[in-house]
Image: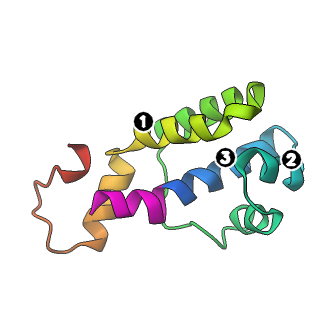
Amino acid sequence: MPQELEVWYLLPALRRELAKEFVNHNKLSQKEVSDILGLTESAISQYLKDKRANEIKFNSQELKIIKETASKMLKDRKNSSNYLYNLSVKLRGTESLCNFHKKHDINLPSNCKMCRA
């Protein structure tokens, strides 16, 4: 089900990319990132080392959207969970998630549009 993919794979992959954006491009500490995302420093470390949430790979357009969201989150940290939610809605049904779904459910028809509904 697409909802399960969102919870188990999309949200963690978004957190991974946001953590990388915050640390690698905005020079935040893992502690600062853990505060913004409401996660432990250990989780941030695992995201940065690709030990967690490495199943979904985003294309360049999706990464651009994630980067834009990271910028908004930095300006309005107290609403970071709202930004993460809106980001997940925006990327719901994208090519990356749909391809991931097709790869993990061999029973889907080739013309499946479930993720894009």
> Which disc, if any, is residue 28?
none
- Return the mark for residue 18: 3
Q: Bounds of the magenta span?
A: 1-10
First reached walking from the N terminus: tag 2 or tag 3: 3
User: Is 80 one of the magenta-colored residues?
Assistant: no
Specify whether 101 is left or right of 85.
left
Q: Residues within 10 Å of mark 2 (few under 14, many from 20)?
A: some
Q: Secondary structure at mark 1?
A: helix
Q: Residue 42, can we see it?
A: yes
Residue drawn at point x = 64 percent, y = 56 percent? 16
Q: Residue at x 62, y 53 (%)?
A: 15
Mark sitting earlier along the chain (3/1): 3
Determine which quarter of the picture holds residue 83: top right
Numbered disc 3: secondary structure: helix
Residue 64 locus on image (x, y percent): 56, 34
Q: What is the three-letter code of the residue carrying label 1?
A: Lys
Spot the residue most to the front. Answer: 78
Mark 1, residue position:
90
User: To which residue does mark 2 refer?
Assistant: 32
**Looking at the rendering, in which quadrant would you find the C terminus?**
top left
Label 2 sits on what residue type?
Glu
Say which of 88 and 21 sits in front.
88
Mark closest to the chain's N terminus, 1 or 2: 2
Label 3 vs label 1: CA separation? 15 Å
Q: Measured along the vertical axis of the image, is residue 72 above or below residue 85?
A: above
